[in-house]
Amino acid sequence: MRKIILSILGILLVLAAILISNQVIENKEVPKQSFNKIVKTVFVEEVLNKDIPIVINASGNLMAKNKIEIYSEVQGVFNGSDRNFKAGTRFEENDVMLRINQEEFYASLQSQKSNFFNLITAVIPDLRLDYPNDFSKWESYVQKFDFNKPTPELPQFSSDKEKYFISGKGIVTSYYNLRNLEVKLKKHQIKAPFDGVLTEALVSPGTLVRVGQKLGEFIDPSVFEMEVAINASYASLLEVNSPVELHSLDKLQQYSGKIIRINGKVDLTSQTIQVYVQVADKNLKEGMFLEADLVTKSESNVIELSRKLVVNNSAVYTVEKDSILTLKKIQPVFFNSETVVIRGLKNKEIIVTQIPPGAYDGMIVKMNKTN
């Protein structure tokens, strides 16, 4: 009996313990977890649409607009010039840059003149008898003939008979052979075609010059051209005589120029067109590398911002309701090397000027205006 009573009490104690523990668990308050929500700060500014001129950036090397390579058309020994034929020497227009020995050629020319003169004097008696009306002009031609001066033009033929007679005597052929030699004689002196400077000299006095040999290079250092490659898609924006601002790489030297030519052909490989810019300044030198800003037409109701702010070339981040980051579609008008001109935003809209890491559409942010 005693064992039964103890068993019943033990069972009651276990049940009581279970009930009490369940009651304690039900009444226990679970502490709420708290999270600190991080709101990122973004730099923003208000949109102000305006008219912006489209400026295309390009670069290239200067080349003299007036530039010639000097070649010899005759053979002989280089006898010198009006000034030293050295790189850097300046010559004025019509100064003799090179003299090539012409003594042998001149003697040959005088011999040809003598033969020509003999042919005419030989037909004078026949002209007196057969062509008395034409005799006086040929006699006058012979009397005025000077071996030390350029050969004068033949008298005009007054009839076909006279022309056939003179031509049959070989006078016309001899005359044009003589004129050809006189032209070649002039090529023994090479004169400066304009005021300029010698940039390359490949011969010195005493050198034997041969036909077709390059002798040097001569440029006008007052006017230069720069050839730049422009994306073919911008061809419609360019016009001849449009202003161009040029500057050195360090932007310390500034120059003004203009577009003088636009190539009508697109390069198949690079899909660019060649644009030629003219610039004049006493401080410029051939071969200098310059950057050019080609000013084209203006676009209205647009803004310019960094290319880093454009997402997928089609959208930018704005802030709406003072705290919600919103990805808004825009229309790119022109891409520069570092900036882009866009259209599609309204005035006073808030645009993000620095995109925060992990930005997404609908993100809660705090604004910090930069202006």
Image: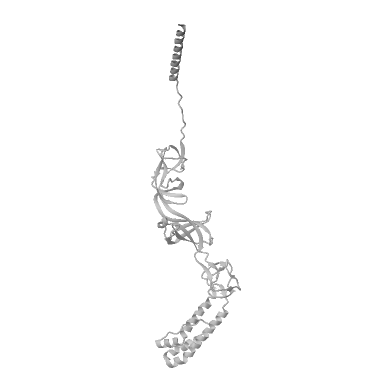
Q: Quadrant of the N terminus?
A: top left
> Colour mode?
one colour
Viewer-closest of 97 and 313: 313
Q: Residue at x 47, y 92 (%)?
A: 125
Give residue 20's quadrant in the image. top left
Res. 348 visible in picture: no
At horizontal 52% and vertical 84% (from top left) the residue drawn is 113
Q: Taking the image as drawn, is residue 60 in sight?
A: yes
Please say if 83 is above or below 112.
Answer: above
Q: Looking at the picture, does residue 293 appear above or below residue 104?
A: above
* Image coords of residue 341 (percent x, y): 42, 50
| Residue 25 drawn above or below residue 87 | above
* Residue furthest out toward the top: 1
Judged left or right of residue 264, residue 85 is: right
- Residue 57 image position (x, y, % from top left): 47, 54
Residue 370: % across, % down: 46, 42
Circle count: 0
Q: Nearer the viewer, residue 181 or 318?
A: 181
In the image, farthest residue toward the bottom: 129
The outermost residue toward the right is 206
Q: Where residue 177 sits: x, y (%)? A: 49, 81
Pick the front one: 147 or 172: 172
